[in-house]
Image (tube, rainbow, N blue to C red):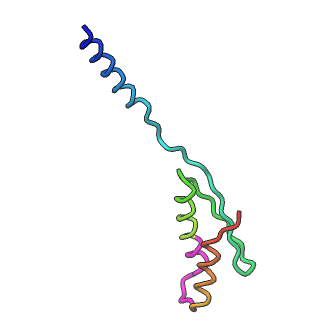
């Protein structure tokens, strides 16, 4: 009898663990960038700040880079701005 009771308890508890699963919630993050007076705001929805930050930093770099080639100093300035967004 104890074996049957223990088996039922374990079976029900194992099933309840699967029901606890929740999907990560998405939150909206806003990043503000300013390069030589040219301000750019990027809003991202992501599960974590790090995911939103990576995506916003890539978009920031592409936005300020434009389509032409950059000098080393200009590229470093853009990287500095995109790596340190304003809140």
Farthest bottom residue?
Answer: 71
Left or right for 36, reference 13: right
Q: Position of residue 47 (x, y in %)?
A: 53, 50
Residue span colored magenta: 60-71
Q: Looking at the picture, does residue 11 appear above or below residue 41?
A: above
Name the residue: 54% across, 87% down: 68
| Total number of numbered discs in the rendering | 0
Left or right for 54, reference 33: left
Farthest front residue?
Answer: 2
Name the residue: 63% across, 63% down: 42
Q: Position of residue 48 (x, y in %)?
A: 54, 53
Left or right for 28, reference 36: left
Residue 9: name its quadrant: top left
Q: Looking at the picture, does residue 12 appear above or below residue 45?
A: above
Q: Position of residue 19 (x, y in %)?
A: 41, 29
Farthest top residue?
Answer: 1
Q: Position of residue 72 (x, y in %)?
A: 57, 91
Name the residue: 57% across, 53% down: 45
43 within the magenta span: no
Q: Looking at the picture, does residue 79 appear above or below residue 59?
A: below
The C terminus is located in which quarter? bottom right
Name the residue: 57% across, 81% down: 66
Residue 59: name its quadrant: bottom right
65 within the magenta span: yes
Farthest right residue?
Answer: 37
Left or right for 39, reference 7: right
The N terminus is located in which quarter? top left
């Amino acid at each position: 009898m104890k074996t049957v009771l223990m088996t039922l308890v374990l079976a029900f508890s194992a099933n309840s663990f699967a029901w606890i699963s929740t999907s990560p919630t998405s939150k909206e993050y806003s990043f503000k960038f300013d390069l030589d007076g040219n301000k750019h705001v990027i809003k991202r929805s992501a599960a974590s700040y790090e995911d939103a930050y990576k995506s916003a930093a890539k978009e920031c770099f592409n936005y300020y880079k434009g389509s032409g080639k950059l000098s080393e100093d200009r590229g470093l300035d853009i990287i500095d701005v995109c790596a340190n967004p304003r809140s």
